[in-house]
Image (cartoon, helix red, strand yellow):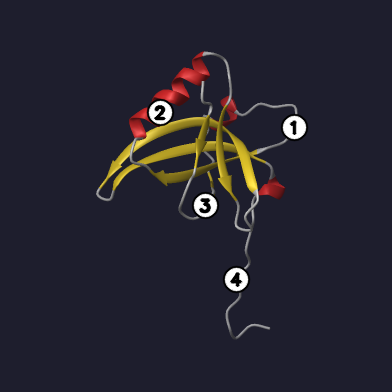
Amino acid sequence: MDNKITIIEGPTPTFEPDNSEWISGISESPEYYDVVITNLRTMNGAGLLERCHQTWSQQDTMYLHYRNSIGLEQQIPILAARLVDTEEGQKIVLWVRIKNEQIKQEVHFDEDEE
């Protein structure tokens, strides 16, 4: 059983906070994690979603495998997935569990500020 969704090419995924109430019901853990959301374009969204469902039905963990912005491989657990059809094609929406130190937060300043 392949329990990974691997990003082979393309940019590092972006993660956004999601404060939906249902998230707290699936994110219990002995350690503290944030649950964030990412949207990925896909050519085979139905196949990826089916692999997620099969892995979860066997009480196993599905992972998102990717390279971060400095090229290091990362693997984080996927908690939920949904397939969305858009004008640009299919996207798979993933809710993942991630530690704060794994999220790169950039601070942007205006050019006039020191």
Dot in front, 2 or 3: 2
Q: CA distance from mark 1 to mark 2?
A: 27 Å
Do the residues under discs 1 and 3 have CB atoms within 8 angstroms? Answer: no
Residue 43: percent from the left, percent from the top?
A: 33, 40
Do the residues under discs 4 and 2 have CB atoms within 8 angstroms? Answer: no
Residue 91: percent from the left, percent from the top?
A: 36, 42
Mark 2 element type: helix
Q: CA distance from mark 1 to mark 3?
A: 23 Å
| Amino acid bearing label 3 | Thr
Q: Which residue is mark 2?
A: 49
- 4 or 2: tag closer to the N-terminus: 2
Q: Which residue is mark 3?
A: 14
Q: Which residue is mark 4?
A: 108
- Disc number at residue 31? 1
Dot in front, 4 or 2: 2
| Amino acid bearing label 1 | Glu
